[in-house]
Amino acid sequence: MTELGYLAPKEIQSRCISRILGGQDVIAIAPEGAGKTTTYVLSTLMKLKFTNDEAPKFLILAPNEERIDEIVEKFYQLSKNRDLRIIGLRAGGSMEDEIEELVAGKDIVVATPNRARAIYLKLALNLNRIQTLIIDDAEEIIKQGMQNPVRELAESCGKVQHLVFSTVAHQKLYDMIDTHLNEDYALVEVDELESEAIDTLDLLLYQLPNFTTKINLLNYLLQDKEVFQKVIVFVNSKLTAQKLATSLFQQNKTEIAILNPLFYDDFGYETTADFIEDEQARVLIIARENTNAVDLANIPFIFQFELPNEKEEFLNHLVKNEQNEDSVVLTFSTDLELPMVRKIEQAVGKRMDVLDLPEDLQIYNPANDKKKKATKEEQEDSSRGGAFHPKKESNAKTFNYGGGEKAKMTMKLKKK
């Protein structure tokens, strides 16, 4: 440990390792670089006992192949001079080779949820002896939509210790793991920011459930024309810029504009200076896609409607100077975008001020659309004319043979 530069435990390690060794379920929330991976790798090595058992004792789920390689490498770094039976299951590798290695016997399995599930369904991944299920970078696993494989694997593991590591805690995280956690689980949150905060514009944050509610909130705020006289809205792509422009309310054709629009018939400008000079224009939508540095001088309100893939693209718009020192940055974030919010906060050394949503804001719920669709289909069924008749009782299908039964019946017919 000393050779690798670990002279003292980080906060997350001092708060988690004793709980993990004691067998408690843990949800650990901490930013990148806080020491989450080292925490569970050390704990696993401390708990690992040599046996001749072929079945694995620890299953670690990670979001992608790159992360799997990093985790396996970390185990080898920290287990110097010690035999280690570990395998990384990768989507790009040979499943037959991986199955052979598993049959030979492994103590630790590191895999993406999809790969682990696929090999488990081939009866090659034995989960009966798993002692600890570890979910690393849980926020990324959720972002990639792998919650169901995680739930299925957790269900198959049965009563084991659960360790969940994430940069953020939100409802989607709890929806994925709640039913499997023991009631006495520990929630450990570590808040590590840069020691020196950067002097930035005022940063405000709205947390919203989905894209449509973001549009509703932007429309709601822009109703106040006395306050929001000149506004810039950042999105990630030109298609999103075009969609947003058509979704915002406007009283005249030049009120909502796009910087270098995708389609020739969309109203827009080539520079922010042109936008500022036009008194009729109130909102300029800018797509980060293929857009160079933008001059934000004399723009009082900057909306970050979407979070970029790289924090630097966001940080470029936060620098305070004489021409924009009174400007305000309002960020709209869903649960899936919160990890990027945390990266930005960590970089600038301070938290964004979270604002409450307006009480009369219309919150979009996709479930309502499904209910409306089901109701409409029921109404259409009930209104069908004489062309629709239920089957006669003699023709009605009253059986549902499985694949095995059908195969047997086919063989009998062939013999006849």
Image (cartoon, helix red, strand yellow):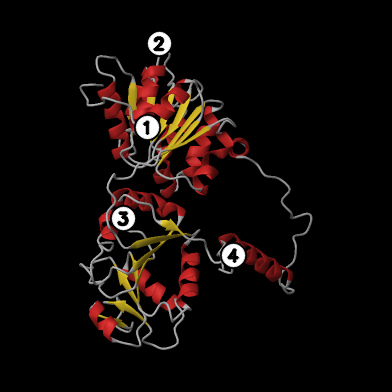
Q: CA distance from mark 1 to mark 3?
A: 28 Å
Q: Position of residue 235 (x, y in %)?
A: 34, 66
**Residue 52, which numbered label?**
2
Which tag is nearer the camera, tag 4 or tag 1? 1
Please name the amino acid that badge 4 sits on: Asp
Please tell me whether mark 3 sits on a helix, a strand or a loop. Answer: loop
Pointers 4 and 1 in contact (C-beta within 8 Å)? no
The reply, left or right, for residue 272 in relation to residue 369 is: left
Seen in the picture, residue 285 relative to 406 is either above or below; the reply is below
Q: Which residue is at the front of the view, 62 or 297?
A: 297
Q: Quadrant of residue 135?
A: top left
Q: To which residue does mark 1 refer? A: 11
Please name the amino acid that badge 2 sits on: Asn
Q: CA distance from mark 4 to mark 2?
A: 55 Å
Q: To which residue does mark 3 refer? A: 309
Q: To which residue does mark 4 refer? A: 369
Please name the amino acid that badge 1 sits on: Glu
For the C terminus, the quadrant is top right
Mark found first going from the N terminus, 1 or 3: 1
- Crowding around mark 4 (Cα neighbors within 10 Å: few <14, some 14 to 19, many 20+) is few
Please tell me whether mark 4 sits on a helix, a strand or a loop. Answer: helix
Q: Residue at x 48, y 78 (%)?
A: 223
Seen in the picture, residue 193 relative to 327 is either above or below; the reply is above
Q: Quadrant of residue 258?
A: bottom left
Mark found first going from the N terminus, 2 or 3: 2
